[in-house]
Amino acid sequence: MSSSLKTFGKAMALALSLGALHAHAESGLYLGGSFGNAKVGYNPSSNIDVKDDDVGYKLFGGIKFTLLAAEVGYVDFGKVEDSGFSGEISGFNAFGILSMGLGPIDVFGKLGGFVWESDFETAQQRYKDDGFDPAVGVGASITLGNLSVRAEYEYYDIDNFDNVSMFSIGAAYWLF
């Protein structure tokens, strides 16, 4: 098969795939909540390296305009406990979201920021910190009437932390 025919075939496959993508019809305001597996890796100094996971949760709300949405929320990563070290991290996030409908399923990517506060301690020392750092996420949802069920993964890029992330499952209610 000639290379121009292969190129044409690939271009047609791409065009058909893009033609199958369409924007989800839902637009408007929504409120929701999720829970899931939260992972935190914390290393404030060279002799401290804590990694743990726990059940985390988040509450969120947003407004969607066909393909684009803006979302704000509160996220709590649960309790971190490892080798006599314990602590918590939580805060508020804001995301811009780009979504594409694939039949009844909506897939989306998120880009935003996280205003956070942490409090970790050992028997000898306490580490409190706060800041603002970038956050990203990907997910999928399915909407049935006024209710959406969604699964997503979010990653928060925070200094002194190896990993702050959460895979969650939740629901959103469309107000109108």
Image: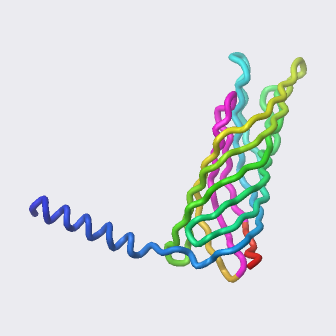
Residue at screen point 73% across, 50% down: 93
Magenta part mainly helix, strand or loop?
Answer: strand
**Which is more toward the observer, 133 or 166?**
133
Tally of numbered discs: 0
The quadrant where residue 33 appears: bottom right
The quadrant where residue 42 appears: top right
Residue at screen point 79% across, 45% down: 91
Q: Is residue 4 left or right of residue 71?
A: left
Q: Report x, y in % for residue 52.
A: 73, 37
Q: Report x, y in % for residue 16.
A: 33, 73
Q: Is residue 8 left or right of residue 172?
A: left
Q: Is residue 169 left or right of residue 55?
A: left
Residue at screen point 72% across, 46% down: 38
Q: Which residues are magenta?
A: 146-170
Q: Report x, y in % for residue 71.
A: 70, 59
Q: Is residue 94 above or below residue 127?
A: below
Does the magenta-highlighted stretch encompass residue 83?
no
Residue at screen point 37% across, 70% down: 17
Q: Report x, y in % for residue 126.
A: 87, 24
